Every structure is written in C-alpha cells, then in structure tokens.
Amino acid sequence: MLSSTKRPVVLILGLTIFACLGLKARSQAQDEARLPLETLKSVDYTRASAGSEGDVVGYADLRDFINACQAYSKGLGVLPNFHEPVLTRGDSGIAVFRKVSPSVVLVLTANFKDDKVTDSGLGTGVIVDPAGYVLTNWHVVAGYDGAIVFFKPTIGTEPDKNNAYGVKLVGLDKQADLALLKIVKPPSGLVAVQFEALSLIQIAEDIHIIGHPHGNLWSYSTGVISQIRDNYDWKYEDGSKHNARVLQMQTAINPGNSGGPVLDNDSKMLGLVAMSEEGQNLNYAVAIDVIKNFVNSSLASKSRGAETHSETEKGQTYVGRSKDGFSVIKTVYSDLVSYTVRDAKGLPTELVAETSDGNVLTASKPNAFGGFGEWTFKPRSGKPIFVKSSGNSPDLVSAGKGN
C-alpha cells in the first residue's frame, strides 16, 4: 500500500501523464483533421448568410504571408556572396564598423504578377529601437508588395537564409524620403544606433557609412561632411519629388547604400543615406533632426502607415461540410481563395489558401492569438517556404530542406 505522503506525488504524476496524453491525442486529432486542397475544393458549398463566421485570418494578413514568402524566395536567388569589408581607414573606422554593423540590416523587396517577380529591390536599413523598428528610405520600400530583412551573420560568408524576418510598414514620410518598418517578431538583444544632435555636426568631420552597394553586403566606406543644406529639393527617376534638410557628403555612394546610416567617430548616427548625383560626386543623406522627428512621431502615434493591400476586402463567403464532418468556410477574394477548417466544437484546425496563379499557403497549429503557429508556402514552381507566426503576421521565414 502506498503511504499517504506518496499519494499526492503519484496523483500529480498521473494527472501530468493524463494531460500529456490528452495534448498528444489533440495533436493527433488536429493532424487527422487536415484536409488536402482537392478535398476542400470538392465540398458542396452554399452561400453564407450575412453575419456568418468568416475566415480566422483575413485577406490582408494572408497577403502578408504570401508576399513575405515570395520576397524571400526571390531574395535567395539574388543574394550575392557576403564580403567582409576591407578596412584601410584606421582604428576609428574598424571600431565603428564592428560596433554598428550588427544593427544594419539588408532589406529585400519584390513585386509579383502571374507568379513572376516583375521588380525587386535591395536596400539598407538600421535598427533605431530595440523593439525591432527599422529605419530606411521611402524609395526603398515604396510600391513593393513584400519585404523581408536579414541581419549580418556573426560567422560565415552570407546571411543565414533560414533567418529572414517579416516586417510591417508603420510609418512613411514621402517628402523626406523616410520609412519606418517593424520586425513582426524581432530577435532578442537588438541594439539601436544612437542619434547625434544636429548642432554637433561639423563641416569637414570624418564620417562612416555601412550599406550594401551593388549587392556587396555590409560594406564600409568613409568620407567627410561637405555641408548641411536646408530645404534641399531632389527627385528620383520615378518622378517622385522630395524635400528635407540634408547632409552633403564627399564619399562613395552606390545603389544598395540607400537607407544606410551615416556615422561619426563615436558611432552615433548623423543621417540616413538617400541619394547621389551621378557623375558629380555629390552625395546626400537626410539629416538627423528630420530623422528624430519622424521616428518619434511614428512611434508615438503607432501609425500603421500605408497598407499595400486593403484591410476592408471581405470576399464572398460560402459554408460547407466535409464527409468527415468538419465544417469548412470558403472565402473567395479577388486574387485568392481560402478555406478555414473547423472541428465539431467550432475550433479552427487548418487554413488553406490558393492564389489565382496556383501558389498554395497552408496553416496549421492554431495559436492563442487567433492565428496559426506554422505556415507552409508551396509555389507553383520551386521549393516550399516555411513561416513561423505568433499571431496573424509572418515572424520568421525559412527555406525548405534542400534550398
């Protein structure tokens, strides 16, 4: 006979085992509840009545996942080899690069049409808040469907392709050519670059720049401040016009440097690289006071900024039931169809979305935030992409095995 002192321990152990078995059984049940796309298509659907329960994940969030996966897939193909910069400018340059480069990110953007990338971009961004806020240029992200960011690797020759982070646009200032992104689920230990005061910037002082010119990732260059220009006007090839206080610099600037920090010898940020006048060795960065005002106002208002895809698109909803007794909600949007599968208790178990060009996004493992924890994107051609999520947005994007 068990002693009375042992009974609570045995009871707790028994309850723990029972709970674990229950969780395992639920997991197995969820796995069994997964219905293939062809089965979901074959269900008989009827038009849903007004006010009926719809998708667990809405159109805009689905597009966020799809666009992040497509931008990531394209990014793997365009990522050049990583090259550690050649530092020949003395101890100060080496110190600045080593301190700030982990806070400089690679921003990859892309547009899509009929499952093909019609345009892609590569720019630089810099961490301005340890919560995962990334500052870059308006022109780096404007007009693109999807964007992801990579961090500088600590070891190796190229960014870790299994650690691409999804981002949301939270602030825009087109006139000053600034954009603020938020990493959906940033890694721990991020260090934000420190801002210098405009009044402390000296003409002819040495500066340091980190960016990705012509795809040469995390490259270092140096130069001097030539002048501070108030109310400076400039425009880009797309016709967009801009105006802000800028720093005129004598340094090497090339495509891919946009969005990179301009730093002093103390590793403090003086400006953000914006553009150069080709052939004239005139290069410009948005001045730090303009940056401070933009970042502070964006963080204070917690504005989401402009959305690429409409949050209001509801789609047409239909309801049906599979032969296994699972209820299925089918929602038809302008460019995709989604299917939400629910069990007998009405709890979501799976979501499958198919785009008009044949790509399939599948979600599983419902989380406590009303979304799904794991997503798989299978393009019409190519290898699958995996996404982890703690809510309704892509956190960490990674490649399938063999990529």
Image (spheres, rainbow, N blue to C red):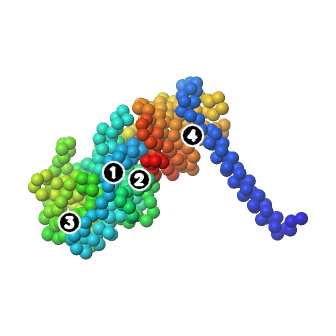
From the top left corner, tell me how far across and down residue 63 is, in percent.
42, 40
Question: What is the tally of numbered marks visible in this picture?
Answer: 4
Q: Residue furthest left?
A: 280
Please name the amino acid that badge 3 sits on. Answer: Thr
Say if 200 sits above or below 105 in the image.
below
Say if 256 sits above or below 270 in the image.
above
Which residue is label 2 attached to?
Answer: 161
- Can you tell which of label 4 and label 2 is closer to the viewer? 2
Say if 57 sits above or below 321 in the image.
below
From the top left corner, tell me how far across and down residue 31 is, in percent.
62, 42
Asked whether the beta carbons under mark 2 and mark 1 sit within 8 Å of each other, the answer is: yes
- Disc marking residue 79: 1
Sequence-first tag of 4 and 2: 2
Which residue is label 3 attached to?
Answer: 222
| Residue name at image x 75 percent, y 61 percent | 12
| Residue name at image x 32 percent, y 55 percent | 81
Sequence-first tag of 1 and 3: 1
Q: Residues within 10 Å of mark 1 (few under 14, many from 20)?
A: some
Q: Secondary structure at mark 1?
A: loop
Q: Secondary structure at mark 2?
A: loop
Sequence-first tag of 2 and 3: 2
Q: Residues within 10 Å of mark 2 (few under 14, many from 20)?
A: some
Quadrant (top left, top right, bottom left, bottom right) of the N terminus? bottom right
Image side of residue 157 versus residue 5, left or right? left
Asked whether the beta carbons under mark 2 and mark 3 sit within 8 Å of each other, the answer is: no
Please name the amino acid that badge 2 sits on. Answer: Lys
- Can you tell which of label 3 and label 4 is closer to the viewer? 3
Q: Rounded to the nearest whole Å, what is the CA distance between mark 3 and mark 4?
A: 52 Å
From the top left corner, tell me how far across and down residue 144 is, in percent.
32, 43
Which residue is label 4 attached to?
Answer: 350
Please name the amino acid that badge 4 sits on. Answer: Glu
